[in-house]
Amino acid sequence: MFYAFGEPVYVLLLLASVVVNYLCGLLLQRKGRAWQKTVLAGTVAVNLGLLCVFKYAGFAVATLNSLGISLPVPEIALPVGISFFTFQGLSYVIDCYRDRTLISRSLLKLALYISFFPQLIAGPIVKYHDISLQIDSRETNPTLTAQGIRRFIVGLSKKLLIANTVGRMADLAFGAGSALDIRSAWLGALCYCLQIYFDFSGYSDMAIGLGKMFGFSFQKNFNYPFASGSIQEFWRRWHISLSTWFRDYLYIPLGGNRKGKARTQLNKCLVFFCTGLWHGASWNFVLWGLWHGAFIILEGLLPPPGKLRRTLWRPLTLLVVLLGFVLFRAETLAQAGNIFANMAAGFDFTLEGASLLRAMLTPMNLLALTAGCVFSMPLQPRIKALAEGENTGAAVLRVGSYVCAGALFILCVMHLSGAEFDPFIYFRF
């Protein structure tokens, strides 16, 4: 019902995905390695075929047309969350191929796994082997429910109070055209970094909180990625469910790092090409993925870092991430080029540029920007560690966390009363 409310037609596609993966799981029970490999290959082809048709057909045809071929570009509406539920279906079938004891004989239980509403449309991507036991046996109690509500409110606050506000600043910069200069270009890039982090981690927190209310324990999807000291560490902290999915189901099956240095680098390149393409049918996303892949490969070729390099690598990592997100946010490569040009040499300060900067730096925007910079750093784990003690101070912190959550909820309601529709960024993936 949740999915049908927003996608009444494509709910049939979701149900078809559930049924196909369920039947293929049952077919894997038949003995014979050749048969099982055939079933697996067919299921993977069906799942990826659906993704290619609905998400990439138009992009592929437009790319061919740019090479001189004249073909009609199909205009197929993108089903919400197709990348997420397709990957969960693939996770189920691959896990069943590897371990036949995981095969579900209940269509309803598999449907629950693939279509569980909190994380259906924007993640996190839950791997079947991580949650199969919880589908049959899970615990709910008032403490877990309260913790889930608190986590949900934190995620909602990230989205409404920080992401949406700095997002408007980013929109002003990326849509400024000739009014852009070096100040607004860097500020816009920084704002988009914060927007996408708080937008996506906010939704993940909401999904994890809702899951906890129903007795499910989902793994965290973000772990303060802007505190990373390398690009490799960044991907251990950013969109963890996607990076581990590609590690488990693509990188390791390709051979991982077990087939020599050249093959290892090729495997990394393929993984990050697919990571970029997964995010959207655009060369901007592909280049964003390859940009990160290039620095992952570079880090792997360098000798182990010393103290000086570790110190210098942290700000360099942030710079690489920030420049990469310009590619991610830009609607075209030309727009990305304009942002990059102004970040490097935008010293033509005009009245239009000054007016743009004033529009971006309003008091509320500055407050959200400051809050974003502060809360993107790992302060919360330190406070949580203090609250886990048995002393009076820890008890005060625990109670205070729920009081703060209540205050944040009131602020969110006030914000919603006058806000425009502003969907989560990852809904389009």
Image (tube, grey):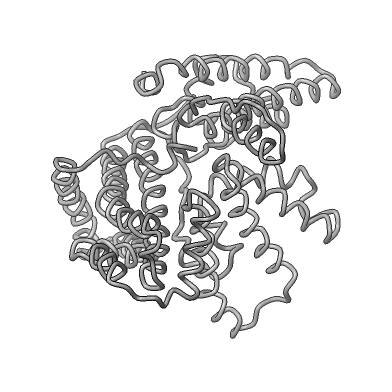
Residue at 72%, 53% (x, y): give it: 269
Residue at 23%, 67% (x, y): give it: 358
Residue 216 occupies quadrant: top left
In the displayed structure, does residue 244 sit left or right of residue 77? right
User: Would you place residue 350 above or below residue 423 in this image?
Assistant: below
- Residue 93 screen position, x and y as percent: 66, 26
Question: Which of 188 and 276 lies nearest the eye of the viewer?
Answer: 188
Residue at 61%, 36% (x, y): give it: 59
Residue 47 occupies quadrant: top right
Question: Which of 131 and 161 lies nearest the eye of the viewer?
Answer: 161
User: Would you place residue 91 above or below residue 360 in this image?
Assistant: above
In what quadrant of the picture does the N terminus appear? Answer: top left
User: Would you place residue 19 above or below residue 403 in this image?
Assistant: above
- Residue 218 screen position, x and y as percent: 45, 40
In the displayed structure, does residue 41 sit left or right of residue 16? right
In the displayed structure, does residue 3 sit left or right of residue 295? left
- Residue 378 screen position, x and y as percent: 39, 65
| Number of marks in picture | 0
Question: Which of 360 and 244 lies nearest the eye of the viewer?
Answer: 360
Residue at 59%, 84% (x, y): give it: 307
In the displayed structure, does residue 34 sit left or right of residue 76? right
Question: Which of 257 and 314 lies nearest the eye of the viewer?
Answer: 314
- Residue 394 screen position, x and y as percent: 25, 62
